[in-house]
């Protein structure tokens, strides 16, 4: 049912209203993509879905306004765009955050557990996000998204599926990722990824955001993996991070070449949407890292954000 009080909180990016909004959005998202059989009043269901879409699009628009300074000069020529996009790996929001070297060298087992709790909840399921995003895409991008999805599926082997690898690590730490235990910035990141993948008006934003994950995950995964090793976490439980430290370098190269380039060459207007999506993802990540540093009381200077 439409809940105007809740929906009206959508544009807030900080404070208690932000937290209330993101927690409720996360709760509703939790059941949204569940496969169901028909039950209850379908009209109510339709209204509920409309309210959810209204709330999340209002939030996306508010975040787009916040990142406007970072996306004012995105080139639309394919070569120039790819150069701009790849620079985000170094200069985008949240890149080279000092949190990660700290996790590698100093975090205790409990610190790492808390960090993983936040990250597991924010993880909206890369496989499903790719599956939702690839619908009706042109052939070359669609094929690369299919290859990427197939890797997420362990190429048909349950042991190699990426989602369950994270679940195994979470089980080792005894992680409790119920949304009420997780900070709102992490919930917002997951909510944003679901919003972009679920609304076709943001299909190219979703492409840009997914590519930003592939491009920036390896740098963070290396630090986390070394931290886990220092804390004597066994190799099978570290696999999610050891794998992504390497595989996502290849995924990122292929994504930029086979997905981004053909899409922008076919229609240069897509560059703006793809670029905004990437910055939205990195900006949400940066807000998480800042929040985590505050939680750990780390007196570190936040790296300068520049797109
Ligand atoms: Fe993956
Ligand atoms: Fe990947």
Image (cartoon, rainbow, N blue to C red):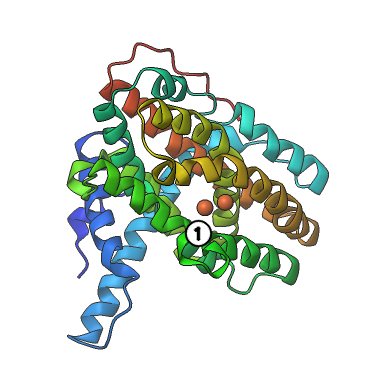
Q: Furthest-bottom residue in view?
A: 38
Disc 1 Cβ-to-ligand 1 distance below 8 Å: no
Task: Name the residue located 31 percent from the left edge and 49 percent from the top edge.
Answer: 10
Q: In this view, does 264 lie above or below 42?
A: above
Question: What x and y, as percent, mark residue 235?
Answer: 44, 41
Task: Name the residue located 49 percent from the left edge and 43 percent from the top edge.
Answer: 281
Question: What x and y, as percent, mark residue 251?
Answer: 65, 50
Using the image as rendered, state which of residue 4 and residue 291 is in the foreground.
291
The quarter of the displayed image where residue 87 is located? top right
Q: Is residue 56 above or below residue 215?
A: below
Asked whether residue 276 appears in the rendered view, the answer is no
Q: Mark 1 points at which residue?
A: 160
Question: What x and y, as percent, mark residue 17?
Answer: 21, 41
User: Is 206 displayed left or right of 5 in the figure?
Assistant: right
The image quadrant where one finds the N terminus is bottom left
The image quadrant where one finds the C terminus is top right
Q: How many labels does the image show?
A: 1
Asked whether residue 164 appears in the rendered view, the answer is yes
């Amino acid at each position: 049912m439409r809940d105007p009080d809740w929906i009206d909180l959508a544009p807030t990016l900080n404070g208690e209203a932000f937290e209330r909004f993101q927690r409720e959005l996360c709760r509703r998202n939790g059941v949204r993509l569940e496969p169901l059989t028909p039950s209850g009043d379908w009209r109510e269901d339709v209204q509920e879905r409309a309210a959810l879409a209204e709330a999340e699009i209002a939030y996306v628009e508010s975040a787009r306004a916040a990142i406007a300074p970072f996306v004012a000069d995105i080139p639309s020529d394919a070569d120039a765009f790819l150069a701009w996009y790849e620079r985000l790996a170094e200069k985008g929001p949240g890149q080279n955050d000092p949190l990660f070297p700290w996790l590698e060298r100093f975090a205790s087992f409990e610190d790492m557990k808390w960090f993983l709790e936040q990250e597991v909840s924010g993880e909206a399921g890369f496989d499903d996000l790719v599956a939702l995003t690839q619908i009706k895409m042109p052939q070359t991008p669609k094929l690369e998204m299919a290859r990427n999805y197939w890797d997420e599926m362990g190429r048909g082997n349950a042991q190699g599926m990426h989602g369950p690898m994270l679940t195994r690590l979470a089980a080792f730490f005894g992680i409790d990722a119920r949304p009420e235990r997780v900070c709102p910035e992490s919930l917002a990141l997951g909510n944003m990824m679901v919003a972009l993948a679920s609304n076709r008006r943001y299909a190219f934003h979703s492409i840009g955001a997914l590519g930003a994950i592939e491009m920036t995950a390896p740098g963070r995964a290396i630090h986390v993996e070394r931290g886990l090793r220092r804390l004597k976490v066994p190799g099978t439980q570290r696999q999610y991070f050891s794998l992504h430290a390497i595989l996502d370098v290849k995924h990122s190269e292929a994504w930029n070449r086979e997905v981004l380039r053909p899409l922008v060459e076919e229609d240069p207007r897509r560059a703006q949407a793809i670029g905004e999506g990437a910055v939205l993802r990195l900006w949400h990540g940066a807000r998480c890292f800042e929040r985590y540093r505050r939680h750990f009381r780390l007196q570190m200077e936040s790296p300068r954000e520049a797109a």
